[in-house]
Amino acid sequence: MRILLIEDDRILGETLVDYLKIENIETVWLYDERQLPNTIKNYEFDVIVIDLILKFASGEEIISALRKAGIDKPIIVITAKKSINDKERCFLKGADDYLTKPFEFRELALRLRALSRRKHIAEIVKLGDLVINIDAKTIHRGKEEIKLTKKAWEVLTLLLKRRGEIVDTETILNYIWPDKDVGDEIVRAYIKELRKVLPPNSIITYQGRGYKLS
């Protein structure tokens, strides 16, 4: 799972990143919410975690802007604001969960997993004559199981999550290789691997932009 954390408290942010890593939850952390537009564009997230009291904009404003932009990822609020009015305001703007500070880190991890499952893409996806089991990470054509490399599977999962959308090459690179300096050619290599397996014309190339799973 990968989450986006918007939190300007650097001590809390660093501690959460370290703890969630132990829980096998990858965290992209923003302590400056002004970086949000580029981050949302270039990364894929399962859940968004946002504080309400930030330096340059309120968390409530950001939640509203995300929903108006069509971002439907689950959003959980972490904040020192405890009143029912604050909670109501966030839920009305589109938040899915609300956790008041201080909180147990383990509880946050449990809530993140619950939200991720709630918005999870269908476990079984049929693509032409293929049956793709997302959770089991298997692909079958009839009784034949088709093998993919780990990275090719991750690329396929991203394209399935964004099916029908053009996924920028930069987004694929940031999703699969967030900490490595690799270029477009590695994406092309795994797209080529997928095309050998998927039905013809399943992946459409948009030159200079990215790829779409049709």
Image: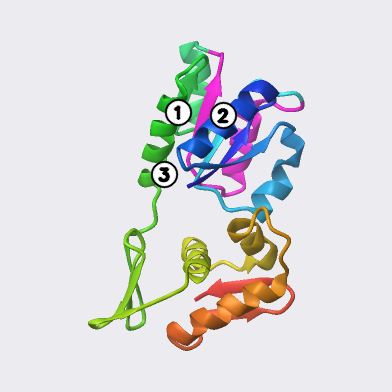
Q: Residue at x 69, y 58 (%)?
A: 180
> How many C-alpha atoms fall within 10 Å of the one at disc 2: few (<14), some, or many (≥20)?
some
Mark nearer the N terminus (2 vs 3): 2
- In this picture, residue 120 sits left or right of residue 71: left
* Dot 3 amino acid type: Ser
Question: Percent from the top left, x then y, of residue 18?
Answer: 57, 33
Secondary structure beneath label 2? helix
* Dot 2 amino acid type: Leu
Q: Are marks 1 and 3 in contact (CB under 8 Å)?
A: no
Mark nearer the N terminus (1 vs 2): 2
Question: Percent from the top left, x then y, of residue 119?
Answer: 40, 48
Q: Which residue is mark 3?
A: 116
Q: Is residue 213 above or below residue 14?
A: below
In the picture, the disc for residue 108 is 1
Spot the residue most to the top: 83
Q: Which residue is mark 2?
A: 16
Residue 61 on the magenta span: yes
